[in-house]
Amino acid sequence: MEEAGMFKEWWANPAVVGLMGFALTTMATGLSIMGFWGGQPTLCLALAFGGTAQFIAGVVDLRKGNLFGGSAFMSYGAFWWAVFLKDTVLPLMGIKATPAGDAGFALMWFLFTFAFMIASFKVGKFLSALFVLLWIAFGLLILLPLGMIPAKPVGVEVFVTGLLAWYIAMAEVVNTVYGKKVLPIS
């Protein structure tokens, strides 16, 4: 029985927003690394969609009791905010990124992603594949600023990582709207 003035709330699955925020920002980053455009699309998406919308999706997912999804969305949302700060705000304050600093930034996320990659094997095969690709991407992003690997294959791998996240989000929204499994998702 509910108390007077209280109501039971219901939240929809935030995975589509969280995954799409991650997907589009990651794909834009991959294209930027490959040289298709500069940092503007990534930085705009990093602040608005990859950062803010994904972070909010994480809050909702935690509210729903999903530790894995909520923690991942909030953390990677914060990652995109950090990318925006590192590449836009800090240079305005005279703090320039260095190759070692960029490699160190990627290393921290490589380690963070490793934990989620291990946990993802219990969540589903598509998400497991996504976290394996993301872990590889961060490994490559450690090597890239140090000049140990060319940009094009790194950009391709980052783009493919985002593309898989986009597919998972698309399958989730299509299957939910149709009320049945139209696209494979796990």
Image (cartoon, rainbow, N blue to C red):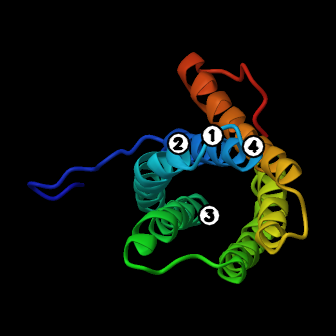
Residue 18 seen in render: no
The amino acid type of the residue labelled 1 equals Trp
The reply to whether dot 1 and dot 2 touch (C-beta < 8 Å) is: yes
**Distance of mark 1 from mark 2, alpha carbons?**
8 Å
Q: Earlier in the sequence, mark 3 or mark 2?
A: 2
Residue 122 in the image, given as x and y percentages of width and height: 79, 60
Specify whether 2 is left or right of 84: left
The reply to whether dot 3 and dot 2 touch (C-beta < 8 Å) is: no
The amino acid type of the residue labelled 3 equals Phe
Task: Give the labeled residue for mark 3.
Answer: 68
Task: Give the labeled residue for mark 2.
Answer: 41
Task: Give the labeled residue for mark 1.
Answer: 37
Which mark is in front, 3 or 4?
Answer: 4
Which mark is in front, 4 or 2?
Answer: 2
**Secondary structure found at label 4:** helix
The reply to whether dot 1 and dot 4 touch (C-beta < 8 Å) is: no
- Front residue (pair 56, 44): 44
Report the residue at 81% width, 75% height from top. 146
Residue 104 lies in quadrant:
bottom right
- Front residue (pair 129, 144): 144
**Residue neighbourhood size for the residue with mark 4, other residues' Cα within 10 Å, grouped as few (<14), some (14–19), many (≥20):** many
**Secondary structure found at label 2:** helix
Report the residue at 50% width, 60% height from top. 77
- Please tell me whether residue 63 is drawn above or below residue 17 in the rendered image: below
Task: Give the labeled residue for mark 4.
Answer: 159
**Distance of mark 4 from mark 2, alpha carbons?**
13 Å
**Distance of mark 1 from mark 4, alpha carbons?**
13 Å
Q: Earlier in the sequence, mark 4 or mark 2?
A: 2
Residue 117 lies in quadrant:
bottom right
Q: Earlier in the sequence, mark 3 or mark 1?
A: 1
Which mark is in front, 3 or 2?
Answer: 2
Residue 103 in the image, given as x and y percentages of width and height: 73, 77
